[in-house]
Image (tube, rainbow, N blue to C red):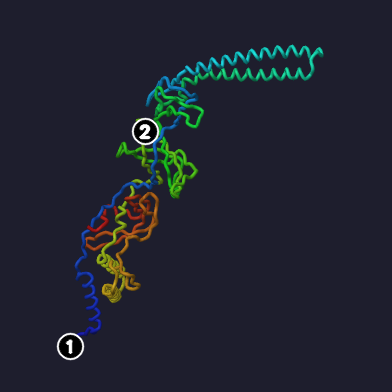
């Protein structure tokens, strides 16, 4: 007769306790299934950028001023007119200029007559001095007087030339460049002022509007990412949904400090063949630092997902079970029993509001929701995510959550690159609870 072997009572108690704890925390085999919003992982493009804004301005802008004070008699061009170098823009009244010219002519005639008389006197005195009939002192005085009359003549000639030029040239204000009239600030009948602190500005001309510039301010934290020739993408409010491109032409090294914020001026050049961009438009720009295309990307929201405590606990217990596959049955049961005992103790202990965060069996940490952060630095471009290793969460066929650690690459405000896990393409990653 074969004797039946009795199972020791304490082993039965351990098994019952382990089974009870497992039922307690996993719902007696019931799947921890919650509703989650997910996103299918696919391929796309990511560009890291530095954002800024600036004003459009024409290239080669010239302010046309007046060199004479007078009254505007005629305005010969208007807004948006195309002008050539030397083309008349404004004519000033000439009445006072003609009077000034006549006065200059009279002064010149008087100075010339005085000089001729002084030269004759000097020649006469020189002959007398040679024959010893005139003293050295009188001869020197005669020569000095001639030099003074010669200087007066030169001055009169200069004033006459200026009066003539005022009529022939400066009374007609000419265009200094080939270009287009951006702004006209003068009307017929106005008095314009020259050679004072309030010189009148008549026109603003631009060489052309086929090329434009953007004057942008870049923060000192980002200026190291800006280089000459760098690609720039920008938009203007006048054409929503349309993107324009340009490139960095100049990085000015003089800082501009406003409200304790240090900025540097960056000049961006862009073509304007269609004439859509106008001076003064506000451009919202992105300086392209790096761009990758056809890469596996994940929404940044997936990294911010924190699983519920129960789901995190089930995922960790499942991971523990997977790690114990190569152990003996007794070791597996003992490890799972410790896990369940620690979980029960953690639940029954007073704790702040939050969730359950559990380790393998020792070193229990304060209860909190499980973070999906998993390490990783930051990167520029607005995304705040950088290269490193981070956790994503997936929902298995049995309804349990499955964590997956991935290596991340570049990021922007919406998406992050997944570098080392191409097999995840097409899978649905959890982004939030419904």
Disc 2 secondary structure class: loop
| Image quadrant containing the C terminus | bottom left
Residue furthest to the bottom in view is: 1
Label drawn at residue 1: 1
The CA span between labels 1 and 2 is 107 Å
Residue 350 vs residue 182, the one in the foreground:
182
Neighbor class of circle 1 (other Cα within 10 Å; few <14, some 14-19, many 20+) is few
Residue 417 lies, with reference to residue 244, above or below; the image says: below
Question: Residue 265, labelled with which disc?
Answer: none
Q: Find residue 400 and report its horizontal and vertical position in percent.
A: 24, 63
In the image, residue 322 lies at what x, y percent? 29, 67
Residue 79: image quadrant is: top left
The reply to whether dot 1 and dot 2 touch (C-beta < 8 Å) is no
Looking at the image, is 253 positioned above or below residue 32? above
Q: Is residue 332 visible?
A: no
Q: What's the mark number on residue 278?
A: 2
Q: Is residue 250 above or below residue 394?
A: above
**Going from the N terminus, do you reach mark 1 or mark 2 first?**
1
The image shows residue 385, relative to residue 370, as above or below, that is above
Residue 367 seen in the current view: yes
Q: Nearer the viewer, mark 1 or mark 2?
A: 2
Quarter of the figure with the N terminus: bottom left
């Amino acid at each position: 007769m074969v004797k039946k072997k009795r199972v020791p009572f304490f082993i039965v108690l351990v098994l019952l306790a382990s089974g009870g704890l497992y039922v307690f925390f996993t719902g007696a085999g019931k799947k921890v299934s919650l509703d989650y919003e997910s996103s299918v992982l696919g391929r796309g493009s990511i560009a890291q950028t530095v954002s800024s804004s600036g004003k459009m301005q024409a290239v080669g802008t010239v302010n046309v001023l007046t060199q004479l004070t007078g009254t505007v008699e005629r305005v010969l061009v208007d807004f948006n007119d195309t002008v050539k170098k030397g083309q008349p823009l404004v004519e000033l009244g000439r009445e006072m200029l003609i009077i000034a010219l006549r006065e200059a002519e009279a002064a010149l005639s008087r100075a010339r007559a005085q000089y001729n008389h002084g030269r004759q006197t000097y020649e006469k005195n020189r002959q007398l001095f040679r024959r010893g009939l005139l003293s050295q002192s009188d001869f020197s005085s005669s020569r000095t007087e001639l030099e003074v009359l010669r200087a007066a003549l030169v001055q009169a000639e200069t004033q006459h030339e200026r009066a003539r030029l005022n009529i022939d040239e400066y009374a007609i204000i000419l265009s200094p460049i080939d270009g287009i009239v951006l702004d006209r600030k003068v009307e017929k009948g106005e008095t314009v002022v020259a050679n004072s602190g309030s010189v009148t500005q008549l026109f603003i001309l631009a060489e052309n509007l086929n090329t434009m510039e953007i004057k942008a301010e870049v923060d000192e934290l980002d200026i190291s990412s800006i280089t000459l020739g760098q690609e720039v993408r920008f938009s203007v409010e006048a054409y929503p949904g349309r993107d324009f491109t340009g490139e960095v032409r100049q990085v000015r090294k003089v800082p501009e400090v406003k409200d304790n914020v240090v900025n540097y001026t960056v000049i961006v050049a862009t073509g304007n063949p269609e004439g859509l961009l106008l001076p003064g438009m506000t451009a919202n720009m992105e300086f392209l630092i790096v761009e990758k295309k056809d890469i596996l990307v994940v929404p940044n929201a997936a990294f911010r997902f924190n699983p519920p405590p129960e789901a995190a606990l089930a995922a960790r217990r499942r991971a523990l079970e997977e790690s114990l596959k190569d152990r003996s049955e007794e070791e597996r049961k003992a490890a799972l029993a410790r896990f369940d005992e620690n979980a029960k103790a953690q639940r029954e202990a007073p704790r702040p509001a939050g969730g359950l965060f559990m380790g393998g069996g020792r070193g229990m940490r304060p209860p909190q929701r499980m973070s999906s952060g998993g390490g990783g630095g930051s990167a520029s471009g607005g995304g705040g995510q950088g290269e490193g290793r981070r956790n994503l969460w997936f929902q298995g066929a049995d309804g349990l959550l499955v964590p997956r650690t991935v290596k991340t690459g570049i990021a922007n405000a919406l998406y992050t690159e997944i570098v080392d896990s191409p097999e995840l393409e097409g899978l649905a990653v959890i982004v939030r609870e419904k």
